[in-house]
Image: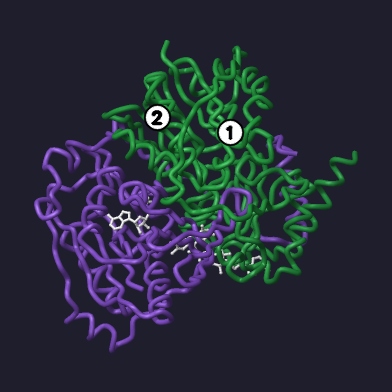
Amino acid sequence: MSEVLVLVESVDGVLRKVTGELLTAAARIGTPSAVVVGAPGGAQALAAELGALGAEKVYAAESADATTYLITPIVSALATIAASAAPSAILLAATVDGREVAGRLAVRLDSGVLADVVDIAADASATHSVFGGSYTVQAKVTKGIPIITLRPNSVDATPTAAAGTVVPVEFSVDAATSATIVAIHTEPAGDRPELGAASVVVSGGRGVGSAENFPVVEHLADALGGAVGASRAAVDSGYYPHQFQVGQTGTTVSPQLYVALGISGAIQHRAGMQTSKMIVAVNKDSDAPIFEISDFGVVGDLFKVAPQLTDAVNARKGS
Amino acid sequence: MDIVVLVKQVPDTYSERKLREADGILDRDAADAIIDEIDSRGVETALQLTEANGGEVTVLTMGPDRATEVLRKALAMGAHKAVHINDDALAGSCAVQTSAALAAALRTLKFDLVIAGNESTDGRTASVPAMLAERLGLPQVTFARSIEVDGSTLKVERVVDGGYTELTSPIPAVLSVTEKINEPRYPNFKGIMAAKSKPVTTLTVADLGLAADEVGLANARTTVIEAAPRPPRAAGTKVADEGEAGSKVAEFLAASRLI
Ligand SMILES: Cc1cc2nc3c(=O)[nH]c(=O)nc-3n(C[C@H](O)[C@H](O)[C@H](O)COP(=O)(O)OP(=O)(O)OC[C@H]3O[C@@H](n4cnc5c(N)ncnc54)[C@H](O)[C@@H]3O)c2cc1C
Ligand SMILES: Nc1ncnc2c1ncn2[C@@H]1O[C@H](COP(=O)(O)O)[C@@H](O)[C@H]1O
């Protein structure tokens, strides 16, 4: 079976969950090979874990430059490995970096790219969910090595352990045509689950009224063990940070339960949450469009309803 | 500082967007077509940079006849001239092909910066700017939430999953902006009138020196196998709060085994 390359994503030496999801998807197509691009020693440190997640080989594309320049070292490393390994597909996470690497690589390898897919089949065709889940589209790459970016949390990692043999790779970086990374700032993840992966999301909109009021949303999220989200209006009004925006131009979520507090349900907000299994909305306007897609809607004041719900949830947990 | 801004005409996200039944490609006639909001932010960025540093703003689009509307919009905002890649042969191009056509047009233009949106609301590949950097051999400085020009150096904060990174880059470069970069100005009456007489150059596949068997739907690098609409969601129960709704929601969640 031919190799399938998976670009490993990690933060401070810790694998991102999506890496396991990618290795599982890769195993459907061929033999998964993990590719680690970074500072020397990183691949060796991750090799056992990557093997356990299904990687037969762990390519170590390592140099001091690899973390200094933006995107181009990764493109160069993957292109170098692709030239010798002739993989049947290259899979990456549909993150900011992953999608940009995929695009450049498709140009360099003269092939095609499927972006932000939610499923991958054995023949390297893939499924997109477009317009906020209004359509499901099956597509394939018709020229060259298929390059595919997978949306995190769409495929369950079900690994079959493999060797995880480290294979060093020589590659070059063109510093002159690259931007330099001066500093990396990681937002503290906190105790709450990651927004895109959470099984419960509680979001607040403009109806929350202020940053000072946002704990009403957080308390309910914490009672339910969920993540906190926000509408664009809430973010733009400074109530909550940008990385928590749900919608067309924010994060797409598909949890078991989505609770919308003081959110009208504009089409661009719905695009990021309408595939949630269960939707509960609280809005004082009985004509708010959010009710059109809610399984349970409450016409009322969120400052009365949400605390009562929080208490009721906590009480049930206590009993 | 001369800047080329990439602007794309997209179906208005406020209207219902559809795929064509025959080939699963975006139905551009089904919805109102507008300048992608993110690209109007790109135009605003360019106008602010040239207002501070001098230079001209050229807007570039690839699209059918009606895409001229978005060029006029950008010209009305204050851009100086426009270039329209317009050729039936390009219809149905994938992102890789689109980037080839845009890069070919960019090679005919003089610029210090190319500015694009980070992600279009219809294509959503979020990779055309990176592809352009690859094709043009320029640094990519993408997903910017803030930009500073210091002589011939750019300083940018790049938004990434779980945080942000600080970047520096020499100019020329390919820049892309995220939606929190600025609020785009509205064209005023004077701007709209002035736009009517600003130059718009049209380029065809032949003008760009692209081979006809490399562009368009028939030669796209990706193809749709099947597209199916998802059944719309139905509304469920709706209650008015009479002091007990919070507890009712809790009962509903418990009955649904969610708590
Ligand atoms: C290109 C584009 C991309 C966009 N991307 C996104 C996106 O990613 N995410 C997104 O969310 N939006 C996005 N939008 C914006 C979207 O169109 C809406 O403007 C936004 O979703 C509105 O947010 P909201 O519902 O919080 O505010 P509003 O529409 O102002 O709604 C506030 C709601 O709160 C209710 N309310 C007020 N007080 C109370 C109270 N005390 N109790 C209960 N209810 C109360 C009101 O009845 C109202 O329904 C985008 C728009 C465009 C053009
Ligand atoms: N056909 C096009 N014409 C002009 N600019 C485009 C076109 N397609 C993409 N772009 C630019 O590339 C950005 C990112 O698009 P995408 O990679 O499709 O998400 C857009 O915001 C535009 O600035």
The percent position of residue A253, horizontal first and vertical second, equals: 57, 45
Q: What residue type is labelled 2?
A: Ala
Same-chain check, marks 1 and 2: yes
The percent position of residue A248, horizontal first and vertical second, equals: 47, 54
Q: Which chain is green?
A: A
Extreme-bottom residue of the structure: B190
Observer-nearest of A306 and A58: A58
- Label disc, if present, on residue A18 of the rendered structure: 1
Question: What secondary structure is marked by label 1?
Answer: helix
Of all chains, the one bearing label 2 is A
| Front label number (1 vs 2) | 1
Q: Quadrant of residue B40?
A: bottom left
Task: Specify which label sits upstream in the sequence, 1 or 2.
Answer: 1
Colour of chain B as rendered: purple
Quadrant in which the C terminus of chain B is drawn: top right
The quarter of the rendering in which ligand 1 is drawn is: bottom right
Going 60% across and 24% down the picture, which residue do you hit? A157
- Label disc, if present, on residue B149 of the rendered structure: none
The percent position of residue B49, horizontal first and vertical second, equals: 42, 75
- Label disc, if present, on residue A126 of the rendered structure: 2
Eyeballing the image, is B40 above or below A190? below
Q: What residue type is labelled 1?
A: Val
Q: Quadrant of residue B187?
A: bottom left
Going 23% across and 44% down the picture, which residue do you hit? B93
